[in-house]
Amino acid sequence: MTNNQSNPAVFRFAPSPNGQLHLGHAYSALLNQKMARQADGKLLLRIEDIDLARCSTSLEKQMLDDLNWLGFEWDEKPIRQSERLHAYELALTALKNAGLVYPAFMSRGEIKRFVVEKQKQGIQWPYDPDGAPHYPPQDRLLDDKAKAAYLAEGCPHALRLNMKAALDLISQPMDWLETGAGWNEENGGVAADPGQWGDIVLSGKETPASYHLASVVDDAFSGITHVVRGRDLFWATSVHRLLQQLLGYQAPKYHHHDLVLDDAGQKLSKSNRDTSLAELRASGVTPNQIREMIGL
Ligand code: GLU
């Protein structure tokens, strides 16, 4: 998987400073490092701090300290999503201009009540791969006058992608090259199925750009050629492929890796201090021991 000098492979590790880094993050970062070295490519750091309510500068500092301690060096100055809001705004404008974005006014509670009502009527309401119900169609169907009136009243809203209109615009099927494995061992050419997500959020009430939008814009901006990340984001790749297609970006290759599990077989969480790198460090574990613990 080597690349020539004029077209180096570019990898990235993209953690969110909304909790402490744990062994799962160490695995992802070290696997990126290993694959970047094998490809004679670059390794970049992107700080995904767009969710301002959950991310903090002290967590970011701790995160950078942990990565430093593990021995990471980045080939370019790290980028911080909170400093790139203009780029997400431009992408959002392009999608708006294509007629693919609408304001969505329903709160979580309202969506829930809508779905319960549908289920009472015996209608099977679709859920996305993360287990959230698809957004009801009402707001997508609002006429311009009603929409303008709600907006003029200052009703809180998110901006969502009109999935059906987006899929209608892209006539050819979309796929990606998977060099790791999906939940059902998918590998090689994988067909994207963004429709299973419904009308995704592009910009939230509190976050100026959703994870999907910001990460796709940034991967393109940094010229990322290889996305190496946990299998928990395997299904999200369908949405990423759609956004890349709509925004005219190249698709990177994807490698979804195993998740590091705890003794009970559960995915590690940022709130569990036992496996946090800070805690392991404080108990005298060395970076080499971390590598051994995760088999890298
Ligand atoms: N920021 C995401 C996370 O910490 C990773 C996003 C990605 O690799 O695309 O889970």
Image (cartoon, helix red, strand yellow):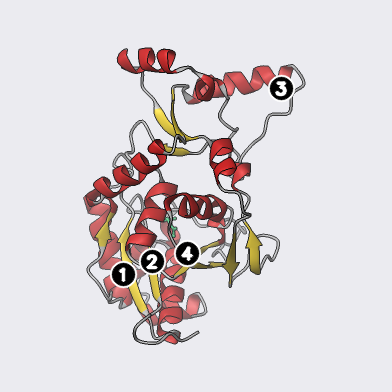
SS at mark 4 in the image: helix
SS at mark 3 in the image: helix
Q: Name the residue under label 2.
A: 13
Q: Which of marks 1 and 2 is in front?
A: 2
> Residue 16: x, y in percent?
36, 54
What amino acid does circle 2 point to?
Phe
Check the image and report above or below for 214 versus 162.
below
Q: Which of marks 3 and 4 is nearer the N terminus?
A: 4
Residue 67's disc number: 1
Task: Give me the residue at 27% from left, 76% from top.
Answer: 75
Q: Which of marks 1 and 2 is nearer the N terminus?
A: 2
Q: Mark 3 points at which residue?
A: 119
| Left/right of residue 211 with respect to residue 80 in the rendered view | right
Residue 24's disc number: 4
What amino acid does circle 3 point to?
Gln
Q: In which quarter of the image is residue 34?
A: bottom left
SS at mark 2 in the image: strand
